Image: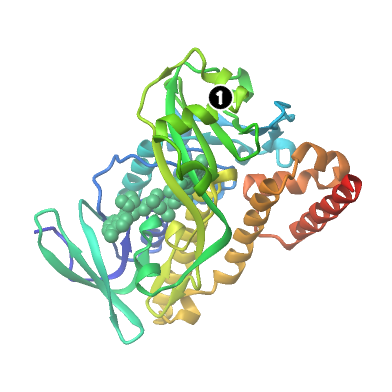
Amino acid sequence: MIDTNDKTQVVVIGGGPAGATVSTLLAQQGVQVELFEREKFPRFHIGESLIPETYWVLKRLNMLDKLKDSPFIKKYSVQFVSDSGKQSAPFYFHDNKDHDCSQTWQVRRSEFDEMMLRNAEEHGVKTHEGVRVLDVLFEGDKAVGVQILDEAGNKREVRADVVVDASGQSSLLLNKLKLRVPDPTLNKGSIWTYYQGAQRAAGRDEGATTVLQVENKKGWFWYIPLHDDIVSIGVVGDFDYLFKGRGTHEEVFREELERCPGAKQRVENATQISKVFATKDFTYKAKQAAGDGWVLIGDALGFLDPLYSSGVLLALKSGELAADAIAEGLKKGDTSRAQLAGWEAEYLVGMERMRKLVCAYYDGFNFGKFVRRFPDHRGDITDLLIGDLFKESLDKVFESIETMKVESEAMAE
Ligand code: FAD
């Protein structure tokens, strides 16, 4: 039997970055939280490159000193290599803001997620690992708690004023309530592995994420330097292209590496230290982020193609916005959708800006050329890349991207 109350103020499903964030920020505001995580931490997870705007939420979580003391590699920039092998100048995040927040980290997620979960406990969150949430309980349209299954096979109900679904791509509530809106175009897949002793740049560029386009533009590689001299390297491409009618994941990975000389050369003298992993990364979002007594955050609310490493930022940001709405609602005695979804519209607009930048890349957008054509937008592009997504002024960038597309189509005719 696990040690949980039968009634609490907030139940959180999932102890990834989204769940740890919402629960820590609620506990800081005096709210009683029980978090259920089906795995025992540390557990493996993909998604290793942070972007700088995570800084502000990590600061509220009191995580900055822990990260500064960690072995995680510091990340100052992102760079792009085209299919012809041409490398853009790095986009240094400090171009825009010369501040602590212009640096971020490349993290091994098993370690980062465990740090976040233990930090939640230090702030008073009651966490239960190895406990799966089977279902969310409703009375009419209002969520009233969850049914859990502990490691010993015991089922039990835990009642709550608010249930937060942070179950990642398992998307418990999104599936139950049939809220999924699949993306019409971003249906990708990924195949990746880890190398030790691979090439890495020196100094400030050591921790740069490099995005390398595959020869036929049918995909791109991420190249993410981690600590212990390990590099995470993976290819992303259309799901059908990567997974239909081809060999094993290992074989497809090798074939794509052959098509990307920049990536191949970086790992040529290195040792592969893990199996090859594969996953689908279909972009989707929920029709709504909250209802009466329930809220969705992180990947449980929506998932965006991994191109610009925005997933953890979105998990942290939605966790923060949800925590503030829930804490305010509990104080007022109002846990209706109107109260809990106050942040939904602005958040989804910000996420859409990142989505548009992702789609532009797949449409042939070239950062170097764009900044040469529109030098005034350099700062805006850096803002988008660091994840400072929530300001209207950025919409002008997309008008200019469209202008440039029309110009190059006209030139090609
Ligand atoms: P998760 O981290 O998935 O956490 C959800 C937790 O819920 C899990 O621990 C799970 O065990 C638990 N859970 C699920 N169901 C239940 C249940 N029924 N009961 C109890 N617990 C449950 N993001 C980046 O920021 N940078 C990157 O470089 C990056 N690269 C990526 C590459 C790929 C190929 C993919 C697929 C994603 C990548 N992402 C990246 C995205 C990132 O992995 C996610 O956005 C992020 O992990 C979302 O955090 P989360 O807390 O919402 O979900």
Q: Position of residue 189 (x, y in %)?
A: 48, 46
Q: SS for tag 1? A: helix
Residue drawn at (39%, 34%), measured in percent from left and top? 248
**In the image, is 298 to the left or to the right of 54?**
left
- Position of residue 283 relative to residue 95, above or below, is below
Task: Quadrant for residue 296, please give it.
Answer: bottom left
Task: Quadrant for residue 261, please give it.
Answer: top right
- Position of residue 108 relative to residue 300, above or below, is above
Q: Residue furthest front?
A: 245
**In the image, is 326 to the left or to the right of 314?**
left
Crowdedness of circle 1 by 10 Å Cα count: few (<14), some, many (20+)? some
Residue drawn at (55%, 34%), measured in percent from left and top? 222
- Position of residue 179 relative to residue 2, above or below, is below
Q: Is residue 361 visible?
A: yes
Task: Quadrant for residue 43, please give it.
Answer: top left
Q: Position of residue 14 (x, y in %)?
A: 33, 56
Q: Residue beneath label 1, please? A: 258
Residue drawn at (47%, 33%), measured in percent from left and top? 252
Residue drawn at (59%, 47%), measured in percent from left and top? 53
Q: Position of residue 120 (x, y in %)?
A: 34, 51
Q: Nearer the viewer, residue 331 or 347?
A: 347
Q: Is residue 58 visible?
A: no
**In the image, is 321 to the left or to the right of 124?**
right
Q: Residue furthest bottom?
A: 140
Q: Position of residue 56 (x, y in %)?
A: 55, 49
On-image quarter of the N terminus: bottom left
**In the image, is 22 to the left or to the right of 7?**
right
Q: Nearer the viewer, residue 320 or 205?
A: 205
Q: Is mark 1 within 8 Å of ligand 1?
A: no
